[in-house]
Image (spheres, coloured by chain):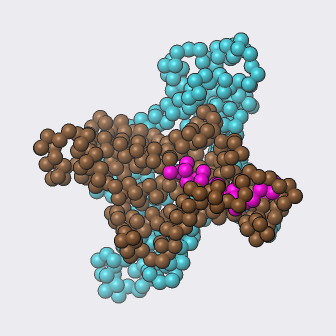
Amino acid sequence: MLIDFFARRIVQSVLVLLGVATVVFGLMHLSGDPVRLLAPIDTTSEELATLRKAYGLDRPLVVQYWDFLTSAARGDFGTSLRSRQDALQLVFERLPATLYLSLASLGIALLTAIPLGVIAALNHNTWRDRLVMGVALIGQSMPVFWLGILLIMVFAVWLNVLPATGTRDGWRSYVLPAVTLGLYSMARTARFLRTELLDSLGQDYIRTAKAKGARPARVIWRHALRNALIPVVTLIGLDLAALLAGSVITETIFAWPGVGRLAINAIYNRDFPVLQASVMVVSTIYVVVNLIVDLLYGVLDPRIEVT
Amino acid sequence: MRALRGADWLVRAFIVVILVFVVCAVFAPLIAPYQPDAQNIRMRLLPPLSAGHWLGTDQLGRDILSRIVFGARVSMKIGALAVALASFVGVTLGLLAGYFGKRADDIISWLVNVQLSVPFILLAISVVAVLGPSETNLVIVLALGSWASYARVIRSKTLSLRNREHIEAARALGSRTGRILVLHLLPNMLSAIVVLSSFEFAKTVIAEAALSFLGLAPSSPRYSSWGIMLAEGKDYLAAGWWVATVPGLTIMLLVLATNVVGDWSRDRFDPRGTRQ
């Protein structure tokens, strides 16, 4: 049964990645003639024909598609049209910066969301609860790009205490981008944890623990929070994936040398191999993290059904 | 008004906020004191509460209030069209996947998973960069970022309703499939669709502003988007904090209002929830 579930989910993930590869391939052909996207505007039609041959774009679409899929499976996305480096190599060089930023954001989000969620749930329907939930709701409604600008304005321009861009200042460089990227997750996790905790506080085993004379702190931390955290953990897995994908705007605002900014610059420079490699890598991470979370859930909770 | 029973003052206040934005969008030329693209270099970077310019002026001396009012028109129009397109496509596919199951469900669910696995902002930017930033392309791209949520929710609702008695009865009476889908299944999902649409609208407003912010808006000077204002204001944080702050707060206010009203309407009309 479990093996069946594993196998199905893995096949499903591979099929999804095949779909993503098709989208990535299709993007370039969306405009009809991809050579025009690659070549400078003043290229003559003879030069275009030569380029078309050089990139193999004169072959039938099906052949190109098959070629793209097989190369992509081997990790070959061609070389950057700008720097002449291997496209996948470029993405991998930028990946650590994005990864560290995402982890820092996730850390900040959890360190604030868990206490906030607990405070809100324990003070259900009091001003504390409303204050925390109000702040969380505002956090969820704050567009990343506006939050980034606001933080730069206050902490870099006015107070001049934190750097606005780059990665040169050690941990201080991380503060503003990580808070910017993490606020949404923080707000969502705090709200979700509060709901789960309220739910779990109403269960029989909490009454039992209390009746046995367990101290309130122990009831909350050992009994209620532990059970409330299980669904939260799956949300965190999804969050990390979403953070990786969502760092595009944050990296642009803070001039962060990660995959997101690489991809944006690739779009502006019409550097399609790099764009294709970035989208494939980010999507693959997303799909794999989701797969792992699902498989873990399948192990942890035998009631899970294949959908 | 009966629908509002039980709404607290906060929800009522945010409903008023949304109505104000709608009025601004519809009557922009009557409400805005200036043309959104009228420049006046001698009046540049005036702070808020200046005479004649309540919200100040930007680096080209354009009236910020007027640009915000016209920006409401862009955000609301593009947001509404994108959500309409996304809900039409998503609901249709969700109904088909849930009702027919098997192969149809496999294919549609696969499409949903693929869509959700591609980082949306990168996809949107690529499509706009390749096709060119027109309003139509923008609506299509934003709908692309939202149809999958509808398909997912409607699919699972359809699955749970498909074998209910009234549907079986309709089938037994020989109703055609299209009739069952539209007349018997769809009405049961209207509240879920409305609730989901409020969240999707908020998401779309943010996405439109994000694309404009990244420089992928139609380049006509008549296209005054809050995202563009924010991007321009970013370069004047020291000289005029209000140039970026006013559009930033505006986007936040509209999104917050939509989310609050969405939360409330979910609790009120669709308590079993359409979203985590």
Left or right: residue A204 compared with residue B61:
left
- Specify the chain shown as cyan: A
Res. A52 in view? yes
Question: In this picture, which residue range is highlighted in magenta?
Answer: B58-80
Q: Main secondary structure of the magenta part?
A: helix
At x 54%, y 25%, the residue is: A68
Q: Quadrant of residue B251?
A: bottom right
Q: Nearer the viewer, residue A272 or B28?
A: B28
Identify whether A249 is placed above or below A54: below
Identify whether B261 is placed above or below B128: below
The location of residue B261, given as percent across then percent down, is 46, 66
At x 45%, y 48%, the residue is: B84
Colour applied to chain B? brown
Left or right: residue A259 compared with residue B61:
left
Left or right: residue A16 compared with residue A168:
left
At x 39%, y 39%, the residue is: B110
Res. A229 in view? no
The location of residue A200, given as percent across then percent down, is 36, 73
* Residue B75 on the magenta segment: yes
Q: Nearer the viewer, residue B271 or B132?
A: B132
* Residue A218 on the magenta segment: no
The location of residue B39, given as percent across then percent down, is 80, 53
